[in-house]
Image (cartoon, rainbow, N blue to C red):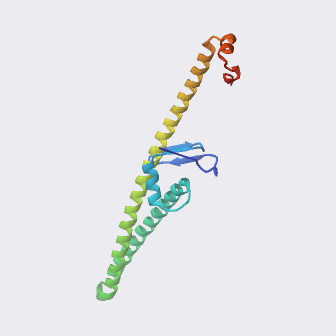
Amino acid sequence: LVLVEQEAEEPSQVSADSSGSSISMKPGPLLFSAETIKLVERAVPGSSSLDQKVRKLVDTNKKMRKDYEEMEQSIYNQRMIRANHQANAAGHGPSDEANKEAAKQLAELKFKLQEAERENTNHQGNIIRIEGQMKRFKANAETAEKELDEVKTQNRQLKKEVPFDPLTYAVKGIDMHDFEQ
């Protein structure tokens, strides 16, 4: 696991997942597995911070969703135009070249749509996995902080329970300032 500092651009971040719930995140360090960092590095190469790379993945996902919707709209419009053209041209005879061009454009758009859907699915999977890891790491960090506080409390109690005999320490040549905090 790798501890990563978040950039302090925003006071807090709210992330909404596909179920409609939101996660309020306080700025501070996050824990990522080395595998997750490698996946993000492979998806977004460069020297920018991990935070910037995750944001870039999210932005790319949004852009791809927008492109996907535009392509769907374009396909729908072309189908409507073709249906209207066929209805209007029923008595005029088909135009082979126009039909070939329309079919070619339709095939290109379908291919682009499939590619965008595939990339969008990959990005969504990465985002969901990273958000799940962030939740687990945050819970682990909180547990570790609680355990550390408990250990510190036990240490203070043990120091209070140990009887203090300055003569014993003076005979052994131990400086009392070594034990003070």
* Residue at point 52%, 57% (across, down): 53
* Residue at point 46%, 56% (across, down): 40
Q: Is residue 119 above or below residue 23?
A: below
Q: Position of residue 90 (x, y in %)?
A: 29, 84
Q: Position of residue 145 (x, y in %)?
A: 55, 32
Q: Position of residue 22 (x, y in %)?
A: 51, 44
Q: Is residue 19 above or below residue 47?
A: above
Q: Which residue in the rendered view is the most extreme toward the right?
A: 177
Q: Quadrant of the C terminus?
A: top right
* Residue at point 42%, 72% (across, down): 74
Would you say residue 95 is visible in this rendering? Answer: no
* Residue at point 45%, 49% (across, down): 34
Q: Position of residue 45 (x, y in %)?
A: 49, 62
Would you say residue 40 is visible in this rendering? Answer: yes
Q: Which of the 4 image quarters holds residue 106?
A: bottom left
Q: Which of the 4 image quarters holds residue 92?
A: bottom left
Q: As rendered, which of 84 and 162 lies closer to the eye? A: 162
Q: Is residue 17 above or below residue 146?
A: below
72 with respect to 178 (left or right) = left
Q: As rendered, which of 21 and 171 lies closer to the eye? A: 171
Q: Is residue 123 above or below residue 144?
A: below
